[in-house]
Amino acid sequence: MKESCEKQKILDNFENTIASCTRCKLSSTRTKLVFGEGTACAKIMFIGEGPGKMEDLSGRPFVGRAGELLTRIIENGMKLKREEVYIANIVKCRPTVDMLMQKDRPPDKEEVERCNPYLKEQIKIIQPKIIITLGNPSTKFLLKTDTGITKLRGNWGNFQNIPVMPTYHPSFILRNGGEKSPLKRLVWEDIKKVLEKLNKP
Ligand code: URA
């Protein structure tokens, strides 16, 4: 059962208002818009890059292989339920190479430009205590930087007075050795910093 708070109604209403968005070209190829999922009362918000195939088909963020890894990080590592955090993406529709819905690609500048007000509104409504950015696109956007994730990860940044912890995207871990990758240990170090900050009196 979803924890409920006043913010939930506002977030749900917002989701309804953008359901048939046509602000960018990705709307012409999407199966489903992937708004985000979790509770509006979340203290932690994860922000990825954009939906992949499984997300586009289901309308839910991080449900493919990368999503399974993210879920294990949340549930086994952080000892939280997926429903207790909020998971969103910088763009809400699936970006693919040549718009052919075959091979995923990062969102382009125009797509981020058109879609980012939605993410900003979600952050404004939820007001998480901490944001965790997964990979380059969301980190670069929120922290307004061109520096890459390898340099930024593990270091606190800030978005509108909300602490931001950048870390590697689960897909990057999967492409570089998966569960046994040393990158996973680095992600865990970053997550531990998040938990320490969250649990500080
Ligand atoms: N990768 C992302 O960045 N977001 C998703 O929702 C799924 C995979």
Image (cartoon, grey):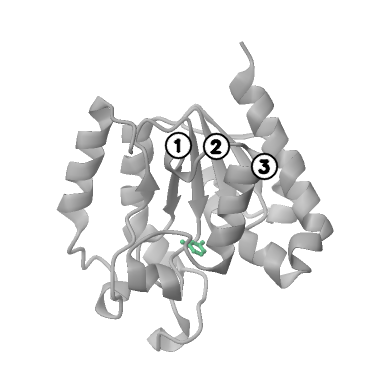
Asked whether, in this view, residue 52 is left or right of residue 165, the answer is left
Say which residue label 2 marks.
80
Nearest the eye: 130 or 4: 4
Q: Which amino acid is tagged 1?
A: Glu
Q: Is residue 138 above or below residue 42?
A: below
Residue at horizontal 25 percent and vertical 79 percent from the top: 28
Nearest the eye: 113 or 30: 30
Say which residue label 1 marks.
84
Residue at horizontal 73 percent and vertical 44 percent from the top: 188
Q: Is mark 3 within 8 Å of ligand 1?
A: no
Between the C-alphas of marks 1 and 2, the distance is 6 Å
Q: Which amino acid is tagged 2?
A: Leu
Q: Is residue 177 above or below residue 60?
A: below
Disc 1 crowd, CA 10 A, few/some/many (<14, 14-19, 20+) = many
Residue 135's x, y, as percent?
61, 57
Give residue 77's mark. Answer: 3
The quadrant of the image that shows the N terminus is top left
